[in-house]
Image (cartoon, rainbow, N blue to C red):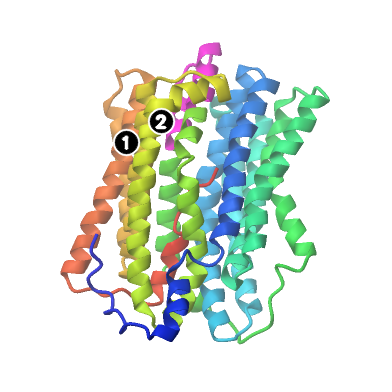
Amino acid sequence: MRLTNIAAPPPPAASGDKKTLAARLSLPEGTLSVGIGLILSGIGSVLFLRIVGSALDDRGTSQITALWFTTFALAPGLFLPLEQELGRALSARRALGQGGRPLLRKVLLLGACLAGVVVIATLAAGSWLAHSYFDRSWIMVIALVLAVASYAPVHLSRGICSGVGRFQSYAVVIGGDGAVRIVACIALSIVGIKSVGAFGFAVALAPLLGVIYIATRGQLKLDEGPPASWKEVTPNLGWLLLGSLMAAALVNAGPIAINVLASKDTSGHQLKTFFGKGVILARIPLFMFQAVQAALLPRLARLATSGEMFEFRRGFKRLMGLVILVGAAGTIGAFVLGPFVMEHLFKAVLSRQTLAILAFGSALYMVALAAAQAVIALRGHALVALGWTVGMVSFIVALLVQRNEEVVHRVEISLLIGSGAAMVSFLLALRSKLASGAEFDRALIVETALDFPVES
């Protein structure tokens, strides 16, 4: 991708500035800390599903798997835009030496309103969710409500840490979620608890421990500053919410669809858990991609404030190179080693073809993410929301068209079509924006670094 409309590079640095320039062009501040947190989160996801599979029967494991993917379809979709906007605005204020507490008060109110709406909606749909989706389990509905409510403060705390450059605390929130969940599930297994509700509450409440820990250490404190207007914290929030919800729904659509379409007998429960574990395995290469994005946001915000657009061009080129490398490695690795890893790590079986298709779908999703980031930076928030909606609608249409196909094949192909449709939409939108002479907005470009990371 050629980002031709970014400002021309600055003149070559003098010899005395070479070290400074090299530091600027190295991996962004915080990459290592956030990367460690994301690796711990990924390991936590894998170990959690393995522990649950060992502790519960097939029905209980499928219920927890359904809770897991539904939580990550809802929570990031709702609260990630608030995290992004809070991080962006705090980072811009930090560059100007201004305190961010007034901003936080505004975003807290928005977060409380969003959480209240989704809790009410979930309870209103509780009867269907309990009997048709969670296989006659009201306790899973309650766990879903608690999970959504728990992730609101998680995303807001991440926005604070990202915006003020507290990356170690950011990593604690990300990694602590998985670590606490594992410890809790191991403890439940050791004492012989087989209640699916107990494991469901482990999913729902685990993320709060990391937030509580960094809060007690003063890592969420902000200084007072100039009053914050709604415009400062909500530019394009409606489009961001729509795009975020569609993006989170698309990346988690496969396991959710399997949960709805698979039979309710023992073989169906097993299929749900096997497919969910295959999706987690296919997502492993995404963690490094997320780490670089997470660390880029505050760095790009400071560069944008000072007008250093040359680094933006280099950043986008690196991002696209990373996407291609990680996507290719993930797809090849899933085809070659996927069945072996599934058998020995998860005690599960999925075909080589299915694992490769899931990994390839994840690679297309990554390209879509990167292209969406560039479109947002070109003032294309509405186009990004449209692109993710196109992807989600394409997934649903493909699912309906393939009514006579076997369930797993039907879902994996639909995932591939949905991710591919989103990717094509964003690439076309980017090409159109560049051809029309649109220029990268220095303020909007900083929003792209944390756009729609995959949660797990």
Residue 196 left/right relative to 217: left
Q: Position of residue 138 (x, y in %)?
A: 66, 30
State which region is magenta.
253-275
Q: What secondary structure characterizes most of the magenta part?
A: helix
Q: Height in image: 446 above or below 424?
A: below
Q: Which residue is mark 2?
A: 334
Q: Position of residue 66 (x, y in %)?
A: 56, 31
Q: Earlier in the sequence, mark 2 or mark 1?
A: 2
Separation of disc 2 and disc 1 at Cα?
15 Å
Which residue appears at 54% of the width and 28% of the height? 133
- The secondary element bearing badge 2 is classed as helix
- The secondary element bearing badge 1 is classed as helix
Residue 264 lies in the magenta stretch: yes
Q: Height in image: 42 above or below 139?
A: below
Name the image quarter holding residue 441: bottom left
Q: Position of residue 102 (x, y in %)?
A: 63, 79
Disc 1 marks a residue whose amino acid type is: Leu
Q: Position of residue 84 (x, y in %)?
A: 51, 64
Residue 83 left/right relative to 244: right
Circle 2 Cα neighbour tier, 10 Å, few/some/many (<14 / 14–19 / ≥20):
many
Circle 1 Cα neighbour tier, 10 Å, few/some/many (<14 / 14–19 / ≥20):
many
- Is residue 7 shown to the viewer in this render? yes
Q: Height in image: 278 above or below 455?
A: above
Which residue appears at 32% of the width and 62% of the height? 317
Which residue appears at 54% of the width and 82% of the height? 95
- Is residue 116 shown to the viewer in this render? no
Residue 210 lies in the magenta stretch: no
Which residue appears at 47% of the width and 29% of the height? 278
Q: Which residue is mark 1?
A: 416
Q: Residue furthest front?
A: 15
Q: Residue furthest top?
A: 266
